[in-house]
Image (tube, rainbow, N blue to C red):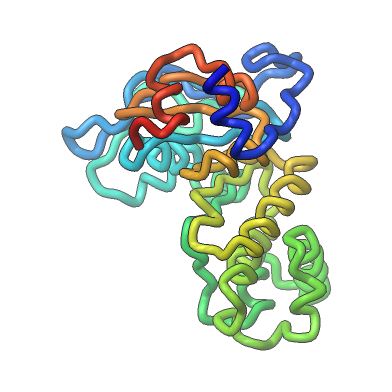
Amino acid sequence: MALVKAFTQFVEPVDPPAVAVGESRRPPKIETVQMGFFYGTHQALRDISLKINERAVTALIGPSGCGKSTYLRSLNRMNDIIEGTRVTGSVMLDGEDIYAREVDVVSLRKRVGMVFQKSTPFPKSIFDNVSFGPRIAGLTNRAELTEIVEKSLQQAALWNEVKDRMRESAMALSGGQQQRLCIARALATSPEILLMDEPASALDPASTSRIEDLIFELKQNYTIVIVTHNMQQAARISEVTAFFYQGRLVEVGQTKQLFTNPTQKETEDYITGRFG
């Protein structure tokens, strides 16, 4: 009861999905099976088995250094750019191992977009930022590019603010606008999945609220996995929450259940502030 009271001071969680975690009628969009991850000889992740359901928000929580961002970046092989890293176990996307030799990493990252903690607009115009991905993919038709840019900015809830400024530098946008621009840039390649690594941690409360509202809208069409240190945020936007600690997946469950009635003492200690 004390834990329930402690949590309800944060926020009332979203209602859990009708189908329990791990019992979806459809196969998971992403599934990691006994996944391990190494930076050289250092093992950062151990035996992570986790199913991520389609068109839902899964939040990854845990103290700094617990492995949640490493796990997130493994879902589109972003860690490949770090020398000396390797993955064990399997990471399945629609039933296919993304670390198989025949997988084209460029195509994978079109399907699995990423938004980072710090907004990273290119020093280009707003239009060129959003059209960057489609252009890299070979699209040159101006009318099609314009349509994609407008649609992506609308999806990112930014179009009305920038529609008359498309030739201006993206660097002139506010922090919150820059982050929504980065979301629009990720959406422009028509991904199926969005990975978000603390996308609102550097933003003011008003901008954070807009990002959270945007995530709520986007989950109607996208599978979203978000790393956050903010437990109130996890409660507001996610259906499922996974708690990581010291490179292990300690517990995963429907968000309301995990925050109010966790099964593991480590989870309870973390969400009640005893450590982290």
Q: Quadrant of residue 265?
A: top left
Counting from the top left corner in percent of width and height, residue 144 is at 80, 68
**Which one is nearer the viewer's eye here, 4 or 76?**
4
In this rendering, position of residue 236 left or right of residue 66: right
Q: Quadrant of residue 121?
A: bottom right
| Residue found at x 50% / y 68% | 120
| Residue found at x 53% / y 22% | 3
| Residue found at x 77% / y 42% | 221
Q: Relative to 21, say whether 243 is above or below.
A: below
In this rendering, position of residue 33 left or right of residue 274: right
Counting from the top left corner in percent of width and height, residue 244 is at 41, 29
| Residue found at x 75% / y 14% | 25
Q: Relative to 251, say whether 241 is above or below.
A: below
Which residue, as the protein is rendered here, is positioned at the far left? Answer: 41
Q: Quadrant of the C terminus?
A: top left
Counting from the top left corner in percent of width and height, residue 87 is at 34, 31
**Which one is nearer the viewer's eye here, 205 or 196?**
205
User: Is residue 7 in sight in this rendering?
Assistant: yes
Q: Quadrant of the N terminus?
A: top right
How many numbered discs, if any? Answer: 0
Q: Quadrant of residue 17?
A: top right
Q: Relative to 256, say whether 142 is above or below.
A: below
Q: Relative to 215, say whether 38 is above or below.
A: above
User: Is residue 133 in sight in this rendering?
Assistant: no
Counting from the top left corner in percent of width and height, residue 239 is at 67, 30
